Image (tube, rainbow, N blue to C red):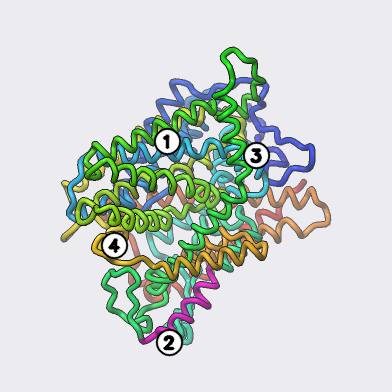
């Protein structure tokens, strides 16, 4: 017997009208199987498997993949194969526990391998505690903001990754056209991205330098435009929508078409080393990509940090209400009656959260003071305050970024954390190898906290749409963090002993190498690019004054342009298919079908990206290097336009 098709309610992705409520798929009035021996066991196994795979591939190949969507696909497949009833609620828990893998891996491999690169000794427990305590801190700092992000901002943020993962999860609950559309789009998007990454049949990136005039502009004026031709990025743009995609792209165009050419025009003949990293090349001798990497990207980091602080100021009422709730809970006398919230609105008690924050901070202090991280109590206290303040400030920034663009600028925020931590530690007398190790461990704690917080807001939004119990997601997420931390750090130790991070045939570890390059001069009296951070801060303040959302604009300045331009194309497709008819219901149906297609592109691209990375690691070389070099960019526009046409045609071919 064919299952009845399942889809999210009509108001899942739009702002609610006054008095309107969102009713999830799993009604709040009923209880459903969520935390079971099956869901916890499979979730833990997924955390171990994907933590090991992500750490291995991220360090060996330099490619970090997001595990949430592949885990959701596996969970749906297992539920169907085992014919389990009440699978939807359990699959959310599996995805929530297992999804810790990608975030903990990112937090660890962005920073901790830099300790080895700099020749500083570190043991397993130091790495494990850095990842574990950072992950726990990210969770407990985010929980008080859950209602704000997933309920109060309902329909205002697109949540692209959560949208795609939710569509995968609910596809397992029903058949019909929705599941077929998602599967077809997943196959198209997955095979499309697989052909690019594995065979190189056409180029992944189109650039204006493919033309003679474009190369001349890039060489002389440092003007270049680049477009990623991947299906997953196009799908991401569709879900983000035209408004935010346009703002993000404007930030990118400001950097690539104005700031980079201006830097070349003004300082082209000069060598500018703002951080004391030993740059010996003049601006004029650099490529536009190198100018972006060494200079312009820092403007985006300053903008992101400032936009985050502006967001915190604006959401002061949310912070105040959370603090008031905590105070009232502590003041409440035992046995006092309290109205119990609906199951789908039930968080861990605020008293538990407050104690969780206190215990996590005390554990971090003990780790710093007695775990060989710093030399004395005073330095441990300084390190604790650095972690607490930066993690708290940037947690909401990470959540905002994931909610808007589906990408967490954790590397940029970690870079700023390392610079600030290094300056502070040098000021309190901690320099040299000990100072570098301390700064990197502090950076590791913050990086993991921000990475986990960004991942967790995605889980909570998925749970909100489907109707999971937030309290269960919040409690069991900590188990996923612990399992992932053990796995990642164990894999890192083995890889260091097997390959090493320096020397011939060493592991790539690109992010950690970048962090090491920044921190070494800082500990030797080097400076920070405060001028560039200041420019980014000024841009964010001006945007806020003009009523333009500063965070997506700043994200555009930080994320490479080739990943931003296709977002506008995807957003434009979303606008086009949802505005062709005078019938609002038909427009809504077309946009919803387009969302399914875009989700399929993201899911297929994520899954086949893992397969492609595994093939590369196994030295299975199927890449057509000569063909790609000669014709890759020339032919890339044809399949990309075909993908755009497929998205429009398939979205429009629907009824109310």
User: Which residue is farthest right?
Assistant: 582
Circle 2 SS class = helix
> Considering only order in the chain, which callout, 1 or 4, is on the residue closer to the N terminus?
1
- Between disc 3 and disc 4, the foreground one is 4
Say above or below: 603 vs 243: above
| CB under 8 Å between discs 3 and 4 | no
- Across and down, in percent, residue 577 comes to 71, 58
Circle 4 SS class = helix
Question: Where does the N terminus fall, quadrant-wise?
Answer: top right
Give the residue at mark 1.
98
Work out how far the residue at label 2 is from the one at label 1, CA to CA, in angstroms: 49 Å
> Considering only order in the chain, which callout, 4 or 3, is on the residue closer to the N terminus?
3
Q: Residues within 10 Å of mark 3 (few under 14, many from 20)?
A: some
Is residue 597 or residue 494 the one in the foreground? 494
Q: Which residue lies at the image location 30% right of the left edge and 51% below the top edge?
A: 439
Q: Is residue 268 magenta?
A: yes
Give the residue at mark 3.
151
Q: How many marks?
A: 4
- Across and down, in percent, residue 91 comes to 51, 31
Q: Which residue lies at the image location 43% right of the left edge and 59% below the top edge?
A: 195
| Rendered image: mark on residue 220 | 2
Which range is magenta? 252-269
| Rendered image: mark on residue 386 | none
Is residue 401 or residue 577 the one in the foreground? 401
Work out how far the residue at label 2 is from the one at label 4, CA to CA, in angstroms: 33 Å
């Amino acid at each position: 017997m064919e299952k009845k098709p399942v889809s999210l309610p009509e108001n899942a992705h739009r702002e609610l009208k006054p008095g309107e409520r969102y009713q999830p798929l799993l009604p709040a009035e009923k209880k459903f199987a969520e935390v079971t021996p099956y869901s916890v066991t499979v979730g833990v196994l997924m955390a171990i498997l994907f933590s090991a795979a992500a750490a291995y591939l991220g360090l060996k190949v330099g490619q970090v993949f997001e595990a949430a969507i592949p885990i959701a696909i596996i969970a749906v497949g297992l539920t169907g194969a085992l014919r389990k009833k009440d699978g939807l609620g359990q699959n959310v828990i599996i995805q929530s526990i297992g999804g810790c893998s990608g975030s903990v891996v990112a937090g660890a491999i962005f920073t901790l391998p830099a300790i080895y690169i700099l020749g500083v000794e570190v043991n397993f427990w130091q790495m494990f505690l850095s990842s574990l305590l950072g992950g726990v801190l990210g969770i407990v700092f985010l929980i008080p903001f859950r209602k704000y992000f997933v309920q109060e901002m309902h329909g205002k943020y697109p949540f692209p990754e959560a949208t795609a993962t939710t569509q995968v999860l609910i596809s397992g609950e029903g058949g019909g056209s929705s599941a077929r559309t998602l599967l077809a789009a997943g196959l198209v998007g997955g095979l499309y991205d697989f052909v690019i990454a594995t065979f190189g049949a056409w180029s992944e990136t189109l650039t204006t330098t493919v033309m003679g005039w474009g190369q001349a502009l890039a060489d002389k004026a440092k003007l270049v435009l680049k477009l990623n031709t991947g299906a997953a990025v196009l799908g991401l743009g569709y879900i983000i929508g035209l408004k935010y995609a346009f703002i993000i792209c404007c930030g990118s165009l400001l950097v690539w078409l104005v700031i980079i050419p201006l830097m070349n025009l003004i300082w082209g003949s000069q060598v500018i080393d703002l951080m004391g990293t030993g740059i010996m090349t003049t601006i004029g001798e650099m490529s536009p990509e190198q100018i972006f990497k060494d200079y312009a990207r820092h403007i985006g980091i300053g903008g992101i940090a400032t936009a985050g602080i502006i967001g915190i100021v604006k959401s002061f009422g949310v912070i105040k209400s959370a603090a008031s709730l905590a105070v009232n809970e502590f003041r409440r006398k035992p046995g006092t009656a309290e109205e119990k919230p609906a199951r789908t609105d039930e968080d861990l008690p605020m008293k538990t959260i407050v104690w969780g924050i206190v215990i996590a901070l005390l554990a971090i202090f003990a780790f710093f003071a007695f775990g060989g991280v710093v030399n004395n109590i005073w330095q441990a206290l300084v390190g604790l305050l650095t972690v607490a303040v930066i993690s708290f400030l940037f947690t909401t920034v990470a959540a905002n970024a994931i909610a808007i663009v589906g990408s967490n600028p954790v590397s940029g925020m970690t870079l700023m954390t390392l610079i600030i931590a290094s300056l502070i530690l040098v000021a309190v007398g901690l320099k040299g190898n000990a100072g570098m190790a301390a700064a990197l461990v502090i950076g590791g704690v913050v990086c993991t906290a921000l990475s986990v917080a960004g991942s967790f807001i995605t889980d909570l939004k998925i749970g909100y749409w489907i109707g999971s119990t937030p309290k269960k997601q919040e409690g069991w997420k900590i188990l996923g963090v612990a399992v992932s931390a053990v796995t990642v750090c164990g894999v890192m130790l083995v890889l260091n002993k097997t390959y090493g991070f320096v020397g011939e045939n060493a592991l790539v570890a690109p992010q950690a190498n970048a962090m090491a390059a920044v921190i070494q001069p800082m500990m030797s009296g080097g400076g920070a690019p405060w001028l560039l951070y200041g420019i980014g801060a000024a841009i964010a303040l001006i945007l806020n004054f003009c009523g333009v959302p500063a965070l997506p604009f700043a994200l555009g300045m930080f994320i490479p342009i080739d990943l931003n331009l296709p977002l506008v194309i995807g957003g434009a497709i979303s606008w086009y298919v949802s505005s062709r008819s005078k019938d609002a219901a038909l427009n809504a149906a077309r946009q919803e079908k387009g969302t399914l297609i875009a989700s399929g592109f993201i899911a297929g691209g994520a899954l086949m990206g893992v397969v492609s990375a595994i093939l590369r690691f196994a030295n299975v070389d199927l890449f057509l290097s000569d063909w790609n070099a000669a014709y890759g960019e020339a032919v890339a526009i044809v399949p990309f336009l075909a993908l755009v046409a497929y998205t429009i045609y398939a979205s429009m071919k629907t009824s109310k």
